[in-house]
């Protein structure tokens, strides 16, 4: 994972705008936001994509899912929010460390 952008962010080798962190996940602002609120939630463990998720990841995946509504509310998204996971090149994934986009606010984009 030495050349994984998000592992480098986790290691503090590349700066990021942190919003939340705990022992399982890290959440930061997308560098090129596509909505008023655009966060990226990533597991601390390197998982390339949803294709590589297995039983051993049940705990971290469930934990991340349950944190998302709390994070959205903390961002002022009381009305709701959008989550996107791009998987594989065909799914538009560019960074191959599993991440959940959390988007919301007035300028909510379509499925890009
Ligand atoms: P993907 O297309 O892989 O689902 O999304 C990757 C996301 O990472 C994109 O929304 C892109 O704007 C974001 N991104 C790429 N490089 C960086 C970076 O160095 N820092 C941050 N915070 N976000 C990045
Ligand atoms: Zn990684």
Image (cartoon, rainbow, N blue to C red):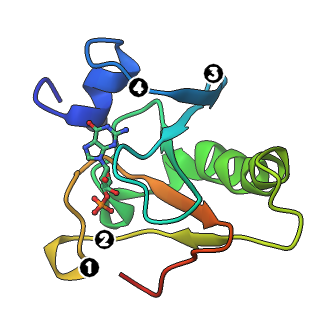
Q: Is residue 70 above or below residue 51?
A: above
Element at label 1? helix
> Which residue is labeled 4 in the image?
16
**Foreground tag (4 vs 2):** 4
The numbered mark, 1 or 4, whose residue comes first in the sequence reads: 4
Q: Which residue lies furthest to the top in this view?
A: 12
> Which residue is labeled 1 in the image?
91
Q: In this view, does 60 lie above or below 76?
A: above
43 and 28: which is toward the camera = 28
CA gap, disc 1 and disc 4: 25 Å
34 and 23: which is toward the camera = 34
Q: Is residue 104 above or below residue 10?
A: below
User: Which residue is drawn at the image coordinates 50% and 41% (left, top)?
Assistant: 29
| Relative to 108, 98 lies left or right | left
Q: Tell me how many marks there are.
A: 4
Per the rendering, the mark at residue 47 is none
Element at label 2? loop
CA gap, disc 4 and disc 3: 17 Å
Pointer 2 with pointer 1, Cβ within 8 A: yes
Q: Residue furthest bottom?
A: 110
Quadrant of the image containing the C terminus: bottom left
| Relative to 18, 12 lies left or right | left
CA gap, disc 2 and disc 1: 5 Å
User: Which residue is drawn at the image coordinates 10% and 29% (left, top)?
Assistant: 3
**Foreground tag (3 vs 1):** 1
Task: Using a 10 Å C-alpha cutoff, classify the residue at mark 3 as few (fewer than 14 neighbours), some (14 to 19) or many (20 or more).
Answer: few
User: Which residue is drawn at the image coordinates 52% and 55% (left, top)?
Assistant: 55
CA gap, disc 2 and disc 3: 24 Å
Q: Position of residue 13 (x, y in %)?
A: 26, 12
Per the rendering, the mark at residue 23 is 3
Q: Is residue 108 above or below residue 67?
A: below
Element at label 3? loop
């Amino acid at each position: 994972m030495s050349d994984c952008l998000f592992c480098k962010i986790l290691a503090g080798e590349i700066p990021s705008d942190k919003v939340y962190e705990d022992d399982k996940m890290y959440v930061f602002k997308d560098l090129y936001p596509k909505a008023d609120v655009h966060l990226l939630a990533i597991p601390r463990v390197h998982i390339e994509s949803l294709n590589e998720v297995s039983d051993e990841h049940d705990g971290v995946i469930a934990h991340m899912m349950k944190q998302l509504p709390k994070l959205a509310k903390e961002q002022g998204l009381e009305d709701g929010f959008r989550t996107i996971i791009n998987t594989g090149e065909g799914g538009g994934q560019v960074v191959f460390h599993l991440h959940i986009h959390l988007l919301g606010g007035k300028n909510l984009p379509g499925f890009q």
